[in-house]
Amino acid sequence: MIDLATPADPADGLAAVVALRRLAEQLEAAEVERAMRTGWSWPEVAEALGVTRQAVHKKHAKRLIAAGVELRRR
Amino acid sequence: MLQRFTKDARAIVEAAVEIARERGASTVEAEHLLLAATRREDPTAIVLRGHGLDFDGLDRALEAESERSLAAVGVSAERPRFTPFPGKPRFATSAKAALEGALRAATERADRHIGSRHVVLGVLRPTRGTVPRALGLAGVDRDELSAAISSAT
């Protein structure tokens, strides 16, 4: 469990929102790549993220093909 | 607006897009413009470097800002490693605001062209957000830095 402390200063809290959005974005890119490298399929990754297969494919397919990741169809 | 930008200013904008892309950012932010400006060989970049803001110095300040902001809500994380997205990231609000600020800085100084100096002045204008926080952590006085850039020749 992450203990989400409440920052004393709203400036820190708002900056945390920005930093967390950036982190979540980078973490998604890293973890989708890692899953696909270890043989996950698009539908499996989509289900794990709670998004459609089309959405995850549209966002990451080109990048992973460029990175030379073997992509499973099913 | 971009037609009034000098070749140097345009080079900063283009380099910022590439820096954002390399870092896996989905959008170009004000800090990417400033990172790009530190790499130039002009009076503005020399002033930035004189304030400890060479590329690596600014990068460390941005990293510290990020760590500190996450720590404020009890989160610590390694920087995730991944293959960057192909294609050009779009300009986020912070970068657009910086470029509008560049235009305003040129207007205030009655300068006809918008150069790298104005782009950096535009980035330095806001008092809240990632860039001013990072500069604060690096011990840089924003107003003093702006004044130094304004008067650099």
Image (cartoon, coloured by chain):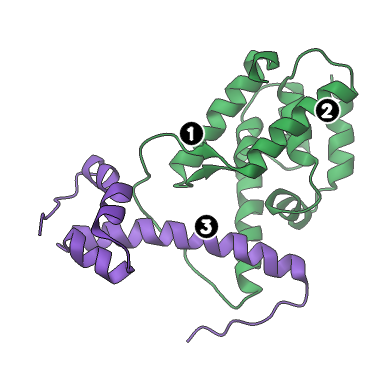
Chain colours: A purple, B green
Q: Which residue is mark 3?
A: A22
Pointer 3 chain: A
Are discs 3 and 1 less than 8 Å apart at CB?
A: no
Say above or below: B72 vs B12.
below
Instruction: Categorize mark 3 by other alpha carbons within 10 Å: few (<14), some (14-19), many (20+).
Output: some
Pointer 2 chain: B
Whether residue B44 is visible to the viewer of this picture, yes or no, is no
Instruction: Categorize mark 1 by other alpha carbons within 10 Å: few (<14), some (14-19), many (20+).
Output: some
Horizontal side of B138 relative to A68 (left or right) equals: right
**Labels in figure, total:** 3
Say above or below: B7 vs B72.
above
Horizontal side of A16 relative to B132 (left or right) equals: left
Q: Which residue is mark 1?
A: B18
Q: Quadrant of the N terminus of chain B?
A: top right
Q: Which residue is mark 2?
A: B105
- In three-dimensional space, the C-alpha distance between marks 3 and 1, rounded to whole angstroms, equals 17 Å
Residue plotted at (33% across, 49% down): A59
Return the x and y of residue B3 as percentages of the image width and height: 65, 14
Secondary structure at numbered mark 3? helix
The amino acid at mark 2 is Ala
Whether residue B10 is visible to the viewer of this picture, yes or no, is yes
Residue plotted at (76% across, 50% down): B132
Return the x and y of residue B130 as percentages of the image width and height: 68, 53
- In three-dimensional space, the C-alpha distance between marks 2 and 3, rounded to whole angstroms, equals 29 Å
Return the x and y of residue B54 as percentages of the image width and height: 66, 38
